[in-house]
Image: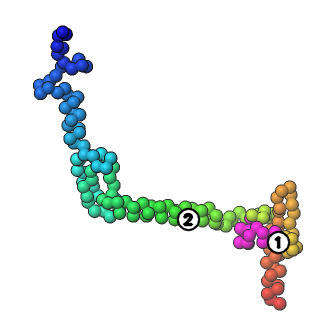
Amino acid sequence: MLPKRSGNRFGQQKKGNGTNSATSSYNQLQTATISYKGMSTTNMRIERTCEYCKNSFIAQKVTTRYCSNLCNSRDYKKRMREKKIGIVIEEDSYKNKGFDPIIKEKEFLSIKEVCMLLGASRWTVYRMIDSGQVKAVKIGWKTIIERNEINKLFLYTRRCKSL
């Protein structure tokens, strides 16, 4: 028969009440933790203010931001709505950068610059070129229109209205 060893199988000596310190701290942690539907929450009580309705409430977690699921979903919808509006405003400002004052000073204009100047679509400018209302020159891949051609276009329309 083997002699009895003192301590447990890991070589630790038992303390006072018969349990080691690791086991006692583990038991204390288990008593401080409450399990609810698979999620563990502590019995801490933190006073917080809801980010949506600004009411005070007692939070059980450090990460809790809202007093209820309703406030959470309403704030989420509000954020998504603001995000969509921001995207639309950004796209609109990108599309309509505004009129470039340098275009007024240029003697030769590209199709894109003529579109900005007239406020017309690219296809409208091409139709005006095809019909002969505006004379254009192709240089490589780029179509160039003289500034005087645009001015003549407006003089022609003024004469037609006066007749």
Q: Which image quarter: residue 42?
A: top left
Give the answer, above or below, for where 38 lies relative to 154. Answer: above
Amino acid found under the numbered disc labelled 2: Ile
> Is residue 99 located in the magenta-colored stretch of the structure?
no
Q: Main secondary structure of the magenta part?
A: helix
* Point 43% across, 64% down: residue: 78
* Point 24% across, 43% down: residue: 33
Q: Residues within 10 Å of mark 2 (few under 14, many from 20)?
A: few
Amino acid found under the numbered disc labelled 1: Arg
Q: Which mark is residue 72?
A: none
Residue 154 at x, y = what percent?
A: 79, 78
Q: Which residue is mark 1?
A: 127
Q: Nearer the viewer, residue 47 or 72?
A: 72
Give the answer, above or below, for where 147 lies relative to 72. Answer: below
Mark 2 falls on what kind of element? helix
Residue 157 at x, y = what percent?
A: 80, 81
Q: Residues within 10 Å of mark 1 (few under 14, many from 20)?
A: few
Q: Does residue 107 appear left or right of residue 30 in this picture?
A: right
* Colour treatment of the image: rainbow
Q: Does residue 127 appear left or right of residue 46 in this picture?
A: right
Q: Which image quarter: residue 103?
A: bottom right
